[in-house]
């Protein structure tokens, strides 16, 4: 029924099953999945929360609620749910991989790589490190080496390459902006930092958003 996108009919059926047995987690779970398919993430979160209340070991409910939180831009809540799923089952590869994707989007390459490697170690046939991640990591590492060697222009070029690969990579804009400041290009610095701030806000990364905002206020 859900596969045929008869969502309203499916929700009616799942609601009926919940009415018959309010302690049956499957009714809430399936209705939550249907709400997610409809893009009704608040309702989906409520249903997954009910599943967890009935069955605190329900790792799929945590994983699906994390996806719903992520769709709402609540990145910290998504990470917390995936972390909880891993605490319940340390061999839950899907949770590691999805948490890695979130860290990757935030520009936290170290945490992303650790999570990808855990997922691959558990299920090497299903999970691979994303190709873009490998490219970004290579450019990021080289840019850091250039910076430490005082080769600012080359470091800027590498961050420019990163942005060309992933235009949503907020950290690359932020780091390039700081490097432009070292070359006295204040206009480009402000432009990059404003872009980084906007992306961090969209991605729910409040800590990095505040850091960039504070730096802009000092310029």
Image: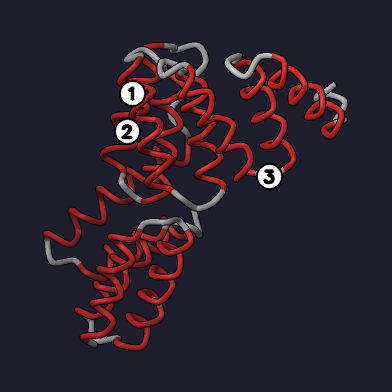
Can you say which quadrant of the picture contains the C terminus? bottom left
Q: Is residue 40 left or right of residue 42?
A: right
Quadrant of res 81: top left
In the rendered structure, which disc, 2 or 3, sits on the residue that comes first in sequence? 3
What residue lies at 25% left-to-right and 73% top-to-bottom?
Answer: 178
Apparent side of residue 155 relative to residue 24 in the rendered image (left or right): left
Mark 3 highlights which residue?
40
The residue at 63%/24% (across/down) is 28
Q: Estimate how packed mark 2 is, as few (under 14), some (14 to 19) or many (20 or more) residues with alpha carbons within 10 Å.
A: many
Label at residue 117: 1
Going from N to C along the chain, the mark reached first, 1 or 3, is: 3
Q: Is residue 34 left or right of residue 146?
A: right
Is disc 2 in contact with disc 1, using a CB cutoff of under 8 Å? yes
When the figure is inspected, residue 142 is found, relative to residue 114, above or below; the finding is below
Could you tell me residue 84's position as x and y percent?
A: 34, 27
Viewer-side residue, 128 vs 48: 48
Dots 2 and 3: beta carbons under 8 Å? no
C-alpha distance separating marks 2 and 1: 6 Å
Query: Which quarter shows the N terminus?
Result: top right
Q: Which residue is mark 2?
A: 113
How far apart in space, not on screen, are marks 1 and 3 (Cα)?
32 Å
The answer to which of 151 and 166 lies nearer the viewer is 166
């Amino acid at each position: 029924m859900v596969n045929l996108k008869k969502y309203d009919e499916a929700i009616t059926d799942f609601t009926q099953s919940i009415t018959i047995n309010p302690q049956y987690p499957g009714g809430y779970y399936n209705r939550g999945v249907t709400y997610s398919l409809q893009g009704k993430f608040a309702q989906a979160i409520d249903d997954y929360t009910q599943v967890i209340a009935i069955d605190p070991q329900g790792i799929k409910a945590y994983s699906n609620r994390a996806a719903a939180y992520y769709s709402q831009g609540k990145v910290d809540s998504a990470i917390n749910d995936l972390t909880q799923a891993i605490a319940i089952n340390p061999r839950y590869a899907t949770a590691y991989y999805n948490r890695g994707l979130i860290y990757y989007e935030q520009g936290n390459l170290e945490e992303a790589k650790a999570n990808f490697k855990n997922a691959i170690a558990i299920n090497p046939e299903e999970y691979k490190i994303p190709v873009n991640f490998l490219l970004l990591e290579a450019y990021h590492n080289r840019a850091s080496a250039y910076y430490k060697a005082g080769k600012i222009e080359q470091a800027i070029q590498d961050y420019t390459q990163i942005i060309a690969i992933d235009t949503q990579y907020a950290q690359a804009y932020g780091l390039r902006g700081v490097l432009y400041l070292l070359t006295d290009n204040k206009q480009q610095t402000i432009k990059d930092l404003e872009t980084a701030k906007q992306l961090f806000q969209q991605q729910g990364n409040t800590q990095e958003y505040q850091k960039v905002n504070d730096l802009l206020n000092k310029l």
